[in-house]
Image: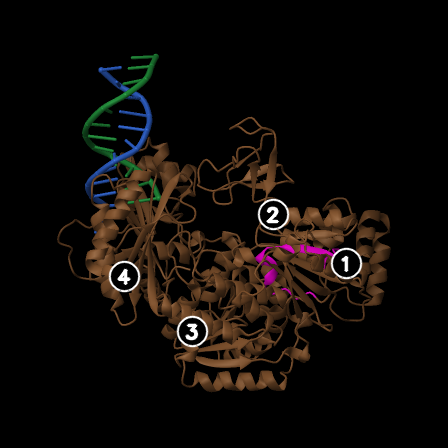
Chain colours: A brown, B green, C blue
Amino acid sequence: MAWADLILPLPLDGVFTYLIPGGLEHEVLPGKRVLVPFGSKKIYSAIVKKVHDTAPVDFKAKEILSVLDRDPLISEIQIKFWEWISEYYMCAEGEVLKAAMPSGLRLESETRLLPAGEGQQIHQINDKEALILKMIENKPLSTINEITVASGGKPVYGIVKSLIDKNIIIARESLKEGPKPRKEAFISLHPSINTEARLHEITALLEKAPRQLELFLSYLEISEYTGNNLPAPEIPKKKLIRNTAGNGPVKALIDKHILIETSYDISRLLPTGEDQKEASNLNVFQAEALENITDLFKTREVVLLNGITSAGKTEIYIHLIERELARGRQVLYLLPEIALTAQIIIRLKHIFGEKAGVYHSKFSDSERTEIWNRVLRKDENDSYSLILGVRSSLFLPFSDIGLIIVDEEHENTFKQFDPAPRYHARDAAIMLASMHKAKTLLGTATPSVESYYNAQSGKYGLVNLTRRYLDIALPSIVIADTREARKRKKMKSLFTPQLLEGIELALSKNEQIILFQNRRGYALYIECSDCGWIPVCKHCDVSMTYHKTVNQMVCHYCGFSSRPGTVCPDCGSNDIRTRGFGTEKIEDEISIFFPGVKVGRLDLDSVRKKRAHERIIGDFEAGNLDILVGTQMIAKGLDFSGVSLVGIINADNLLFFPDFRAHERSFQLISQVSGRAGRKTRQGTVIIQTGFPDHPVIKNILSNNYRKNYLEQIYERKQFSYPPFVRLFRIILKDQHRETVEKASALLAENLRKRFGGRVLGPEYPLISRIQNRYIMNIMLKIEKGVALPKVRNLLRKEIGQIRSQPGFKTCIIIPDVDPV
DNA sequence: AGCACGCCGACT
DNA sequence: GTCGGCGTGCTC
């Protein structure tokens, strides 16, 4: 056993074999991190995948420099899961590693070096080693990179390694490393001060130190402590010193043993124990659904819970989670980014307290590392056994999952697109669950066609929950025909008379309104009305969206922005107008039609700033806003009791989006948004503006008929060979030169057709044919059921490799995207 | 990905 | 004459 196959955090296929140096034989184990040299300069920390005794034949293995962990950091199941993701989604295992681990745990050439410290034997060291050692002694915690630079750019790892071997220096070990959790200081009274008499004594004692006295009294006031032999409450230090100058008095009182200061991890201070609530009792329909789920889990790995909005799915989840935790197993509750809101977090935190951890993309790396560690340390008192997280929380180091809940299962944001691995969190969750011998529950009001199909075919269990919690009436839906209104010249800007009346009525009754528009920005574009010139992004092939508040035109694909001129650069005309409309413009128009009304906006632009999202939602909840204008962000997981009207400004740009999922998505989105209307007591109203009131999807929405919509969709999918009847592979080609992508795509498509025939579609330019100066072409592969997928993948890999190896195509980026959404 | 090597154009 | 551009090959 002398070699180790390693996964390096690089987008390179396969593993890399390194020699295990003498002395490390028993330390190099699967799942541990090791430090290795790679290429001429770099040092990476890699994960050991396998240890073996097969000598490599066609290359000379380098040696592992050091082992970073005492115990494996990655379990066997995780390695298997990474392997599956990389195989299924056709990416390198290194790319999975990068997505899976917080970068804090992935030290690269940033590895810090330390002198080994006292009591070391004196070894013989040569001049070079002495020099490096000196550097490390002078500046402990230097990185390998820094030392390389300091020694004139010459590779130093050999020297570093021999110093590590001689135990003269050490690479900082994982056990000591990692970011410190953020702490918050709390102030309490010294335990000896616990009677009213003592309090009086202290007050007298502090007579001559007015500032300290003031502080002491202010503690008593805030904490409402009166001394009755009870322990004094801890209050946040921030709160105590808010009105005092500086830290001096606090320190003085601590020195006098009057106050004591304690620090806690901030993450433990999120809503916890004190107001912990019980899960509420289930109504008869929920109880029945719960029982059905339990029953189906006896025979199925996956159950789809199709529960309409407001049916109380979360309550059912809570009961299932409680049961699983009681069995000592872990639970993962996955939500799409936009649905993971404060509302749901607080609710679950109240019930599960410190057992529940939240994993969100907005967390800093140190917070992620902290969560990682708390999942890893199962069964310790600060460990998390329930994780509430976004798709990447699939990669947390669970050791024994009992249940994975995928809420809002139909959301396409569960599919990662940008960097590899391009995985679908719902599908990956099902795989992960099976590796843990756990069950998966998919929950949604509007199942994806794929999942519902699986439920119909018996592959998944299906549980319906059709009764709204407390029997709240469904909102009444009004279709406002924009074409008709336009014909009669009744349209006022973007609004039909129905919508304007609806808004007015709601406002008069002091009720709140949500307006949904699927586009952000002010205008979709600016146009010269004389020559038709439209400004386009100079890096991408899209027209620029005009944002009025900043007077900028912004490209929503690459973020490039520029200031619009007042004259057309093409023809010199100064008749430049805005066309189309986004959320910003609606916000603007509302204040014209309804002066004095308070309007808020919730879209990607308005929530860029940290906490802006919470602030806007909070304002709306508190009734400080009358109208909330937003994109799909408003559709998810929010529960506003004061809303009586939901307006959908333009359903048509959803319905006619050129994609085979457009109808499915329209139904889902409009249902979700509608669900925001009139939740608690009153019946709400939804007004949908469309030019096509007879469109089948609109009809299905009117009759609230998910099933009919599904049947229409599944029929189309079958007719035109789309998932779930076929499996899609999209191959994306990108290059800076139009000609290169076109030639490479044409050749790849031609070669693929030789193997797959008519299953190959394209190449085609996508809707946006150039992004960030790269031209893009897509080839689609439709593989019918029953064809062996590993074979397909191998052929695809081979053909892609074949194109990549040709001179002239070397610069072309070729990316397979499996099960694209 | 990141780095070295090597081959061509515009510069001190 | 050389500096630096990118196209290409390689990394255990």
Q: Classify mark 2: helix, strand or loop.
A: loop
Task: Name the residue tied to disc 4.
Answer: A759
- The amino acid beneath tag 1 is Glu
Dot 2: chain letter: A
Q: Classify mark 3: helix, strand or loop.
A: loop
- The amino acid beneath tag 3 is Asp
Q: Quadrant of residue A468?
A: bottom right
Estimate how packed mark 2 is, as few (under 14), some (14 to 19) or many (20 or more) residues with alpha carbons within 10 Å.
many
Task: Name the residue tied to disc 2.
Answer: A581
Across and down, in percent, residue A691 comes to: 58, 58
- The amino acid beneath tag 2 is Phe
Depth check: give the residue in front, A678 or A184: A678
Across and down, in percent, residue A227 comes to: 81, 67
Q: Classify mark 4: helix, strand or loop.
A: helix
Q: CA distance from mark 3 to mark 4?
A: 41 Å
Task: Name the residue tied to disc 3.
Answer: A400
For the record, the magenta segment spans A619-640
Q: Looking at the image, is mark 1 or mark 3 nearer the viewer?
A: 1
Task: Name the residue tied to disc 1.
Answer: A504
Q: Which of marks 3 and 1 precedes in the sequence?
A: 3
Depth check: give the residue in front, A769 or A106: A769
Same chain assignment for discs 4 and 2:
yes
Q: Which of marks 4 and 3 precedes in the sequence?
A: 3
Q: Are marks 3 and 4 in contact (CB under 8 Å)?
A: no
- The amino acid beneath tag 4 is Arg
Dot 3: chain letter: A
